[in-house]
Amino acid sequence: MKQVTLKDGTSLPVIKLTESDLPEITQLQTKVIEHLSEKTFLQPLTNEDFKYILEGTGVLVGVRAEGNLIAFRALLDPGEDPEHLGKDAGIPHELWSSVLYSEITNVDPAFRGNGLQRQLGKIVMEEIDTNQYKFVCTTVAPFNIASIKDKFELGMHIAALSVKYETLTRYIMMKSLVTEVMVSDDTSIEVGMGENEEQQKLLQSGWIGTSIQACEEGYTVVYRKMI
């Protein structure tokens, strides 16, 4: 059984959650949202979303400490999503059925700082059936620095900057599970994270976001040309 390790050295088992865990899952999600300083950073899942995943259309793993659910992370098969991220990411329509969404990660505020989001991310990625799925996509709010760094660490890159959920600007980040994305090492462009139009021009011209950098004004995104 896979484990996560807290910063004090304590190891905790990672478990696959079931529908019987749903009350705790939704309770933890509510707790996390209540502690967010920027509520729009998190797009919560509904009970129906969680049930859909737990019925076998994704992966939902969690961690317990002293019997209480302290963290979970989800992957979701979006099916016929009318706002399919494959479109934003430039994935051919015939391959959309091989796309998984990296969905919500919730960590109890009392257990933040233990790297649980990162550790669970690596574990759920290892659970993916690569015979069935070839891509992982997700949305991340600009300036949600912890989440952006998490996705980069999992090997994702910024493929698009779009309006999702009707009114919210989101990076569309993706990872191919079958091929490595090749980029030019010779040229990179740094763009302020708030400069949406400039970023969209680059993304529409064959550039992808590969990292972020802190600066006096906040953060820049490093873009490299795909080859």
Image (cartoon, rainbow, N blue to C red):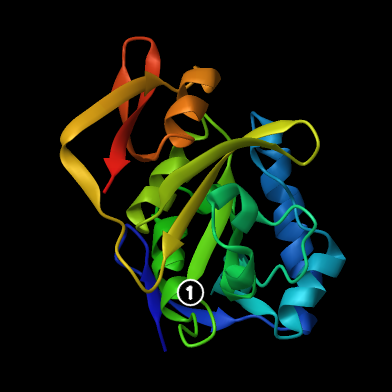
Q: In this rendering, does residue 73 appear at all?
A: no
Identified at 43% across, 51% down, the residue is: 151
- Report the side of 130 relative to 91 (left or right): left
Amino acid at pointer 1: Lys
Q: Nearer the viewer, residue 110 or 2?
A: 2
Residue 1 lies, in percent from the top left, at 42, 89
- Report the side of 170 relative to 123 (left or right): right
* Residue 50 in the image: above or below residue 224: below
Q: In this rendering, does residue 34 appear at all?
A: yes
* Residue 26 in the image: above or below residue 95: above
Q: Residue furthest left?
A: 186
Q: Nearer the viewer, residue 41 or 172?
A: 172
Q: Residue furthest right?
A: 48
Identified at 59% across, 54% down, the residue is: 108
Q: Where does label 1 land, which residue?
A: 134
Identified at 52% across, 34% down, the residue is: 144
